[in-house]
Image: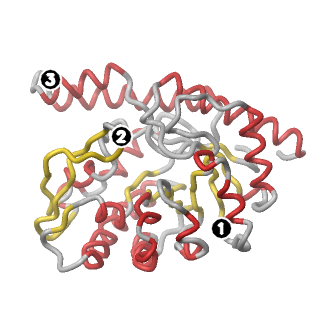
Amino acid sequence: MAQTLKTTSVGSFPKPPALMAARTRFRKKEISLEELRAEERAATRQVIQLQEDLGLDILVHGEMERGDMVAYFAENWDGFTQSLPVRSYGNRYYMKPIVEAQVGLGKAAGLAAAAWKEASALTSKPVKGMLTGPYTICDWSFNTYYPDRRALVLALAELVHEEAKALEDWGAEYIQVDEPAISTRPQEIDLAIEAMAIVTRGLTARTISHICYGEFDRIYPALLDLPVRQLDLEAANGRFALIDLLNQHPWPQDKELALGVVDVHSHRIESVDEVKAGIKKALEVIPPERLYIDPDCGLKTRTWEEAQQKLEVIVEAVQQVRAEEGLS
């Protein structure tokens, strides 16, 4: 693995046509759950193989088993039911969970660890364990049971902690906790920090929190207090204005940054030169051994070809920067 500017991806990948067809057939009760699972495993193999072919340093399993990052856990954990479809953004919808009872892992304990174990068996490279954070699960759900948001967030934090501990016990070196909702309610940053402290309590794996969709200047520098080893933040979507923000406050020596350098909400394929410029701008603030390079967010909204092309640009840009800056 490279020593500097390690390359990775954020989490989700576009689902191949065969898996999309299988999911439709499963909803119509035309195939069994095991047949659907077989297609998910085949799609996961495709994701792992693509990343290996491209030469990424740290892989993701692509989340082929998940329709939505919040609804997936709510569908499997105790205490949740579902509403009718709710618009998330654009013309995309998800079944918004409803918390109607005390939340618990129930029979789904180790859900993320099982997916990680299958994917990691397909490669000798490290694969991230992927979890959705308690603050985002609360924010993207209706709550009809707990007395307030804080009570629900902290209850969910205990569940996510158990899932994170299962990932570590199975051998995951990297555990990512996605919290896109953090940046949308700056007045609750302290609650998000409190919840993350529960999630990462006692873990020795490298913990990561991916955050996107919001205005980082509303939660910075308080964001630096989030108790994780690495923050994964989008930059390409904002034309790398994030780097100017980070430059206003010293970056902690004990924190890493994963920098999003391609926009996952655009069909346009970035040029290698513009990605290189963003990386070099970040190197003025973050030392190369603590800077990771990836897309802004999960790639599931792109076509398979677009996802591949954007990752190819990342890998080529990083290789050129390493060579030009004398990095290994």
**Residue bearing mark 3:** 31
Query: In which quadrant is the C terminus drawn?
Result: top right
Which residue is depicted at the point 38% across and 62% down?
133
Which element carries disc 1, helix, strand or loop? loop
The location of residue 17, given as percent across then percent down, is 34, 20
Q: Nearer the viewer, mark 1 or mark 2?
A: 2
Label 2: few (<14), some (14–19) or many (≥20) C-alpha neighbours in 10 Å: few
Query: Would you identify the image quadrant in which residue 256 lies?
Result: bottom right
- Report the Cα–Cα distance between label 1 and label 2: 34 Å
Which residue is depicted at the point 31% across and 25% down?
19
Which residue is depicted at the point 47% across and 54% down?
213
Q: Which amino acid lies under the numbered mark 1 shown in the image of this protein?
A: Lys
Q: In the rendered structure, are the residues bearing label 3 and label 2 in contact, judged by CB atoms less than 8 Å apart?
A: no
Q: Is residue 10 above or below residue 320?
A: below
**Residue bearing mark 2:** 90
The location of residue 281, given as percent across then percent down, is 78, 52
Q: Is residue 226 above or below residue 259?
A: below
